[in-house]
Amino acid sequence: MSHQLLFTHLNRIAPVPEAEVGKLMALAKVKALKKKEYLFQEGQVARYVGFVNRGCLRYYRLDDSGKEHIVYFAIEEWWIGDLSSFYSGQPTTFNLQALEPCELFLYTKETFEQARQEIPAYDRHVKLLHARATDARLETMMSQRSNTAEARYLKLLEGFPDIFQRVPQHYIASFLGIKPQSLSRIRKKLAEGK
Amino acid sequence: MSHQLLFTHLNRIAPVPEAEVGKLMALAKVKALKKKEYLFQEGQVARYVGFVNRGCLRYYRLDDSGKEHIVYFAIEEWWIGDLSSFYSGQPTTFNLQALEPCELFLYTKETFEQARQEIPAYDRHVKLLHARATDARLETMMSQRSNTAEARYLKLLEGFPDIFQRVPQHYIASFLGIKPQSLSRIRKKLAEGK
DNA sequence: GCAAAACATTCACCTAGGTTAACTAATTTT
DNA sequence: AAAATTAGTTAACCTAGGTGAATGTTTTGC
């Protein structure tokens, strides 16, 4: 279980001594998820937050009429979890499912707090991630309001091209907030009209 | 400048000794805004976060084609500001404008940090508000995806009826993510079809 | 390696909400 | 209190994306 990727990841933001990353790893629980397995599902308490060391997952909710809405995909170097449920202990309304075999580094409330207290660099990192998560939700919301599905598709294609190699198209559609048929139509139009 | 409302507000969540609220008030800068005045506008740094003691404001952004999108309305007992810009010192992309004459209790980064350090109850309160803000953005996003404009209108009417007495209808439309004409149409249909 | 299931594409048709524009209140401003 | 601006309503028409159903293509599980 190398912590190579975690090390690289943390250093991307600010230099962190390798020893600190070792501490962080020591507190983590390494967990493998098979394809289609869940880290948690609606109704459970999201007891872990974690780092994706390998694999790809989707975070989604079922609406009142049972339709799935994907909020985000997580691949290597993403932090995952439902912070709201994690902190409050209330059951989550979301589902976090592996789309590929995954390897995760997980923290419980206890190990997470310990890590934040013992490793100041990690605490700063977490604060940053919190802020970014809030911003990201807001940006998604604004983008949904101001842009057409086609524009959002192109933006995703530009900013996150790998995802198309890794997740089925109907999940991409769900992430974009449209139906698979509509995504097909958009792709067709772009391929022709180009 | 009574802190009555702030006292009531904080106690709604957990009991806070009145003396603590006095400390909090002592750190605040009381600011009046006239109707249509801005606390901040796009491009400026959002130097304050604050508590609405009286009045009503809208928080909105202009999209690439110059259209306004209202993210939230704030009335008495709301906390306002762009946390992202406040913490980072980067210019905000939002506008915060008074829709009525307002009285705000404002905190700078310095007084805010001091308040959080000196008043543990306030620190807990702030953490709670952060978490709620993130959740609220996510819920708005999900609601936008799963519900029609009509459903969102009815939900607003139910959960926040006062707002219709206080803000012009075209702002409500902007908040709901539709055009004023569409809101008119929806209201008409509901009035008839009832 | 085959059957079953899950994915993707296409098409015809439908609908919520956008657009444009005309008309009528309400507010502000002077 | 008139003039000017800002708000709200209505209606005809348009368009992005939803629905349903048929058809083909991959994956998956045994």
Image (cartoon, coloured by chain):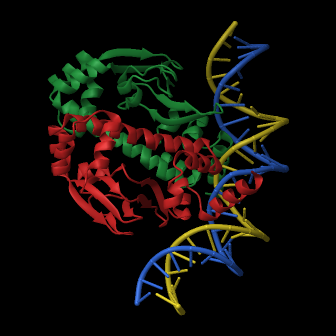
Chain colours: A red, B green, C yellow, D blue
Q: Is A150 situated above or below B169?
A: below
Locate the C terminus of chain B and report the quarter of the image it occupies: bottom right
* Residue under the point 67% across and 48% down: B185
Q: Position of residue A12 (x, y in %)?
A: 35, 37
Q: Position of residue A13 (x, y in %)?
A: 34, 35
- Image quadrant where one finds the N terminus of chain B: top left
Q: Would you place residue A74 above or below residue A9 in this image?
A: below
Query: Is D14 placed left or right of A122 in the picture?
Result: right
- Quarter location, residue A74: bottom left
User: How many numbered markers are drawn?
Assistant: 0
Using the image as rendered, state which of residue B9 and residue A81 is in the foreground: A81
In the foreground, A139 or B60: A139
Q: Is residue A123 left or right of residue B67?
A: left
Where residue B94 sits in the image (x, y, percent)? 50, 28
Q: Position of residue B173 (x, y in %)?
A: 59, 40
Residue A132 in view in this figure: yes
In the picture provided, is B151 more to the left or to the right than A18?
Answer: right
**Residue A90 visible to an observer of this rendering:** no
Q: Residue at x 46, y 23 (%)?
A: B91
Q: Is residue B57 left or right of residue B106?
A: right
Instruction: From the viewer's side, name the closer residue of B189 and B60.
Output: B60
> Could you say which is closer to the camera, residue A104 or residue A145?
A104
The residue positioned 32% from the left and 58% from the top of the image is: A92
